[in-house]
Image (cartoon, helix red, strand yellow):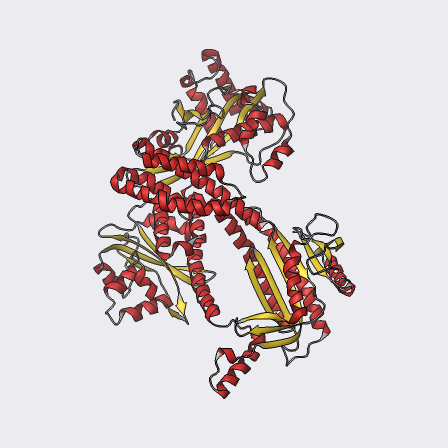
Amino acid sequence: MQTKILDLVDKHQMDFDGLDNRLSLEKFMDYLILLGKNKKANKYGVFGHLLNKIKDTETNYGQINEQNIEHYSEVLYFIYNLLVPFLLKEESTMWGLASPVCGRVFYGTDAFYGLVENKTDHDIKTLNDIDGFRLQILYQLILDQLYGIPSYKESETSAFSVLDNETGLTKYIGISIDNSYVKVMPKGPLPKLDLDAIIENNAFEVDWKIFLSILPLENFKFEGFSIIRLTDTTLLHVTERLNNIAIERVNLGFQVFNEELENHLKTLTENPKLKANLIPALKLNGTPVLDYLLEQENSVFGRLLREFGSDKELKPALIGYFNNPKTIVYNMPAVFSNSKSPFIEKIAELGVGSFSCVPLTHQGNIVGVLELFTENSILVRASDISKLKSITTILSRLAHDWKIDFENQLEIIIKDKFTPIQPSVEWKFYEVAWSILRNGKVSDNKLEDLRFKNVHPFYGSIDIRDSTVWRNNANVEDHKILLDVLTQTIDDLLEIQPLDLGLMDLKKITLSWKSLISTDNIDSVQAEIEEFLLKDVNPLFEKLQMQKGELSGIIGYYKKEMLPYGNCYTHRNDFENAVRIVNNTILSELEVLNRDTQEYYPCYFEKFRSDGVEYDIYIGQTITPKRKLRKEYIEQIQYLQLKSMATIVRSLESIKKELPIAIQTTQLLFLGNTNIDISYRMDERRFDVEGTYNTRYHIIKKRIDKVLVKNTSQRLTQPGKIVLVYIHETTRVIYMNYISKLQKEGVLNDEVEVLELQKLQGVSGLKALRVGVVLP
């Protein structure tokens, strides 16, 4: 243990020097006295002994302060043993005590000081705004102790990265600050605080700097001490990064994806010599696809194909292996023995030092393999394998996602070049195909459209509320971060090359963009900023990097932040990830609806995905000619559609905690009570409505999602509710019966509104039912 004054943060943008804070043990002593009143407490004697020890030390040396801290070393060691779990090893525990909220550490473990002080071997960088973090702590203490507004967390957390200059690898450290023994005292009367107005102006995130004018810090006094705990959060950081590259994997491309994956696995294992490659189990018609391995420079199997491709036995052996992959081990530590594999000898010829290939499974199915290897005489360590076990699930999901992407890409091409035919209407296309075969080749322009007359339509829409606003806000925030990163990069470069006119010009332009960017002009400004980066920033940075190698680190950091998974894409990735989770949840429930409706009566079911999901269902005798369409089939599907929409609302509510941002959805059904005609247009290769009336139905369903309630400014669709738009009163009566049934089942609540809607262009007389869903 050490008693030494140390400031955790060297530089501050904000001035905290005038903060009235005093190191004190008073609040901690009060807590000990409170605990000591319980005579039955096992540690009663310990509490009393420590209190006496503190009082004796105060008598001899005065109350604790930074100047007499050495005399309190025994007292502080007692405090450490009380506050830290007994079984934790002191030599590996990173724990310290600091003056209240100012960041000046005065006591801690050797491990704590060893990490923070050793700046020769480590390059330490904070991962977020440390001043803003400290400001948040100060005002949360004020709000909690003086206004009775508690923080939602027991301790505040931040993080920093530690770059090992010897290995070039980064470790990530979480910093947790516990202010349980800090007391806040006002220096005068407390001002009244309008917290609702503050929150209203900052709906997404509290701007703690607002409080500087409302509650100036000089009006408060802070006494006590803060407890600081440092923990290795590298696994958490790597996991988060892997999730990010999972989102952007398609944009990155497979090669760059694997390079990023390898870097993160090096970080996790602390092994700079480790090489890694993820190989998804891609199959075409049941046969493993090997061609793409040839393009993977960092794959051992890819190197085998390139080096020994003329070996006639190699490719069949690889196909056999990827059909049923098993763990392969070559030249690993003593705890592993070499596998009996036909590839071992050739792997050795490649100059590979050691190699391990591990199958990855997802829901019981093989989805790929992970290659781990080293070059020359260096070995993969047993500890590397052990550390990677913690992220096996993520790696399996990544392989699964690549496998699904491959299958989806094939499907997209097929749907682009060929007709996506659903089982319910396949019979009709078979008839046309047979007609073509029977009569000889027929050109496309002579094929007539396929018509399905007198079908009953069902339409549903689940829309993400204010998706354009969310997307624009995300775009604006990310471009603000981008400009901040660019400004900081230019400043860092100017410190080395202070007279570079090109950099000075870039900074002026960058600062001008900062003042221009807003949600009103984001589309045009974004395009201009991208052009500015492409034509001005990137060429200059490339030139500087070639001229001075010492600038590579600064420019490399900028480039990394600019990657699709870097900080400059944080808000957009959060939005897209939230949309993806919501859409996948909706689509999963619609698959259930599709399955159930097909069981009652085969129908045409079509989905459209954007910021939400729309779908059409068509049911009719012309679609399923061999089965008589009865009224009860239509009624049953009407009921299933309404119940499905309620299930979707409940499912979306249950996944709210998984969403990176709090997006909401609105739900709408358009209840057409008159049959329409649809056709498959041969020229456009898609289904569409037929005739004037049918086109009117299509126009209505596309316009009603933005309609207002009559004589109000209120939008019809609302989160947590289902809207049923209809024209005829008989439709309302039918659906009220379904609503009543679902209310009895506890799916819908008793709140049912009957509403008239404002007139749409060319459409009048629309009405709606709006009913709330019972949320889980």
Q: Nearer the viewer, residue 19 or 32?
A: 19
Q: Residue at x 37, y 57 (%)?
A: 254
In the picture, the quarter occupied by the N terminus is top left
Residue 223 vertical placement versus 556 (above, below): above
Q: Nearer the viewer, residue 12 or 136?
A: 12
Visible residue check, residue 35: no
Q: Residue at x 63, y 19 (%)?
A: 189
Residue 60 vertical placement versus 123 (above, below): above
Q: Nearer the viewer, residue 478 or 115?
A: 478
Where is residue 721 drawn, in percent x and y? 68, 53
Q: Residue at x 37, y 29 (%)?
A: 113
Identify the image quadrant of residue 591: bottom right
Where is residue 184 drawn, in percent x and y? 56, 23
Where is residue 266 drawn, in percent x and y? 34, 47
On the picture, is 139 further left or further right than 301?
right
Identify the image quadrant of residue 769: bottom right
On the picture, is 5 further left or further right than 210?
left
Identify the image quadrant of residue 630: bottom right
Residue 129 vertical placement versus 328 (above, below): above
Visible residue check, residue 743: yes
Q: Residue at x 34, y 67 (%)?
A: 321
Residue sitting farthest toward the bottom: 438
On the picture, is 267 further left or further right than 135?
left
Number of labels in the image equals 0
Where is residue 76 drawn, in percent x and y? 45, 23
Residue sitting farthest toward the front: 762
On the picture, is 620 further left or further right than 115?
right
Q: Nearer the viewer, residue 154 or 409?
A: 409
